[in-house]
Image (spheres, rainbow, N blue to C red):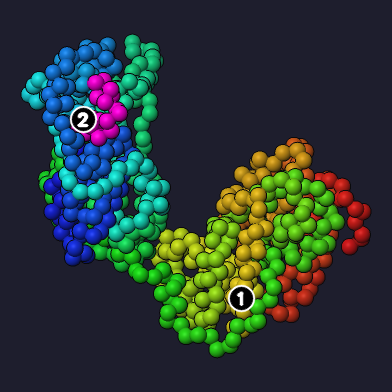
Amino acid sequence: MRYIGNKTKLLPFIEESFLEYYDDLTELSLCDLFAGTCTVASHFKPKFKTVIANDLEDYSKVLADNYVALPGPPAGYEAEINRLNALAPKTGALSLAFTPEGTSGRMFFTTENGRKIQAIREEIESLKQNRNMYNFLLCSLLESADTFSNTTGVYGAYLKKFGQRSRQLFELKPYTPTTGHGFSLQEDATEVVKILQGDILYLDPPYNNRQYGSNYHVLNCIVNYDSFKIKRVKKKIGGQNTLSESQTGLTTEMNRSDFSIKKKAKDALRKLIKNAAGFDTIFMSYNDEGILSMEEVKQIFSSHGDYAVRTRVHKRYKSNNAGDQRKETKEHIHVLTRKGKNKVESILDNYPNRVFKRKKLVDPIAAPVVQWVGGKRQLIDRYMRHIPEKIENYYEPFMGGAALFFKLQSLNRISGASYLSDMNRELVLTCNMVISHHKEVSDLLNKINEKHSKELYYELRNIDRKEVGTKRYVKTGDIFDLLTDVEIAARFLYLNKTCFNSIYRVNKDNLFNVPIGTSLKKDFGDNGRLHEAGKVFIDASVSAEDYRTTISAAKKGDFVYLDPPYEPVDKKGTGTITLGGKSFTSYTVDGFSTADQITLKNQCDQLNKRGVKFALSNSDAAVILKLYENYNIYKFDANRNLNSKKENRKKAAIEVLITNYSSPQIPESE
Ligand SMILES: C[S@@+](CC[C@H](N)C(=O)[O-])C[C@H]1O[C@@H](n2cnc3c(N)ncnc32)[C@H](O)[C@@H]1O
């Protein structure tokens, strides 16, 4: 079949590339994740032990059902082909949509050929009980129809006059599958690859902005001959806007692939490669005219293992909308071979065991998993007098270590669901991994604990950057690309436990830049603590999102606790608002300015109007006291251990808790 990106001519190059990495293919499995015409899957089916073909499009599934899933043509197919060829032509939805006999006068097929296709398609449906025959004949119909179409190869347009090929009388020809063993799938590649496991993953994603759904819609209509709907689009006729059918008969339901969208292609590939952990080797065809540059592909591949690229010059696919007149393109095959081990495990190999012994394990208790600057553990008990006694749904954006949530759960105070969130993606992922994969995270954290040293701390901290001068770094990758989710969580917990004062601070490139803490003797190995902590999250969801999104769902009777970055205390402040206060408040790369405090106050007003109870912690900055003057303000003296200079640490720090409801018990004076 003529198809954008069809790999027929490149099969020898692809095979040669496979053979450079594997001596023998016969015992291996191959997954062709963007199968299109199934040229690749079908060519390799006899050469591999098993092959899977997957694609989003309906027509591609039909091709895969025949070429890949069938071990050979069904018995008696010749007679069926003859019988179908002898059917009388028939008018129907297909012939009306795609031939001149319809009101739109489209010229994808001659009327006569369109009617033959219609008749054969309807008859094939009656054979559905005989699945193999059905798949074989439907695939043969698609392939045959394509050879009679009045196009240059894609259905984005038809030619103004019927050309030589399309004027021939339609004949159904058999298209037989190769021998061998295979499966067909029709799923989104990025999602389905999560659950697949095998030897070779072959990727041939769309490389330009032409969506397959709209370039091959006619083939999809042949598959769905009795249920497709032509889209209606706005057109100007006689100066008036009117709704009429799309000129080329595009349908109402069409897939859109992120790989064909410039803004989304890079993220799509990044996600795909990350999800493809079930494969040892990945080969990806991509040419030099693609949306993604060589450098971008290289960067994504290299963060998951060893990267190599092979290149061939290939004759260009001609199409009439190409402004580029080059006759050749460079076809690349990017190769990723995964290292036997994950990145953190490989680093651990280089570090000797720690000199001191593990402490005796203590009984696990459910305590927050991370220590968070500004964390409320010391204040929580005093807070409790001001927290509603009965909470249905609980909301805690700015969750950090989520100390109040842990406390409320331990007292069984939440009867409904809990919604926690934070803008720190690593924190949120860590929390979710503790909930779902505590064992794996715990095992890795214990291994790190055994080898903790200053060198290891910096090696793991600097895994996403390279040093370009004394203590000057440039970012070399994103943690979310470089590490597995388990590794991200274990690294996060490790850095949190061993960095200076458990501070979380990132620089403008979002690189965590806190130095190691002073004591090397800390034992942070896990003894079941993570498991216990994970259990606390029953009926809770933890998301990486803006606080406004989280609290927007809170309704009357719910309780919201807000612990935002604090407004810096300006001792001379009068409550007049000066924007952009600077202090130790950059918990995320975005920071939180005085303007953000004002927005937050407006959000609290809205909660109040909706009858939602809220409690908010902050500093006693004049601005804050002024902003919330109409609410209840309780003052606490807290020693927040934030200052890095020892002599400043013990100074009193006043914090406030602001609420919009009466406290369950009369507060003692602080
Ligand atoms: C370059 S073509 C593949 C060509 C194929 N190797 C061949 O030889 O015919 C890309 C294919 O990816 C499919 N596709 C695009 N996005 C997809 C996705 N998210 N999941 C699965 N398939 C997708 C398209 O439908 C198209 O068939």
Q: Amino acid at mark 2?
A: Leu
Magenta run includes residue 139: yes
Report the mark closest to the observer, 2 or 1: 2
* Quadrant position of residue 161: top left
Q: Residues within 10 Å of mark 1 (few under 14, many from 20)?
A: some
Q: At numbered mark 1, what does the secondary structure look like: helix, strand or loop?
A: loop
Q: In percent of the image, x 77 and y 54: which residue is there? A: 412
Determine if residue 81 is in view.
yes
What residue sits right under mark 2 in the picture?
A: 137
Q: Where does the magenta region start and end?
A: 122-140
Q: Residues within 10 Å of mark 2 (few under 14, many from 20)?
A: many
Disc 2 C-beta below 8 A from ligand 1: no
Determine if residue 576 is in view.
no
What residue sits right under mark 1 in the picture?
A: 524
Q: Quadrant of the N terminus?
A: top left
User: From the viewer's perspective, is residue 643 above or below residue 175?
Assistant: below
Name the N-terminal-most of marks 2 and 1: 2
Where does residue 225 sit, x and y in percent of width and height? 30, 22
Of residues 629 and 310, the one drawn nearer to the viewer in this rendering = 310
In the rendered image, the residue lying farthest to the front is: 75
User: From the viewer's perspective, is residue 610 above or below residue 482?
Assistant: above
Q: Main secondary structure of the magenta part?
A: helix
Where does residue 181 sit, x and y in percent of width and height? 24, 48
Disc 1 C-beta below 8 A from ligand 1: no
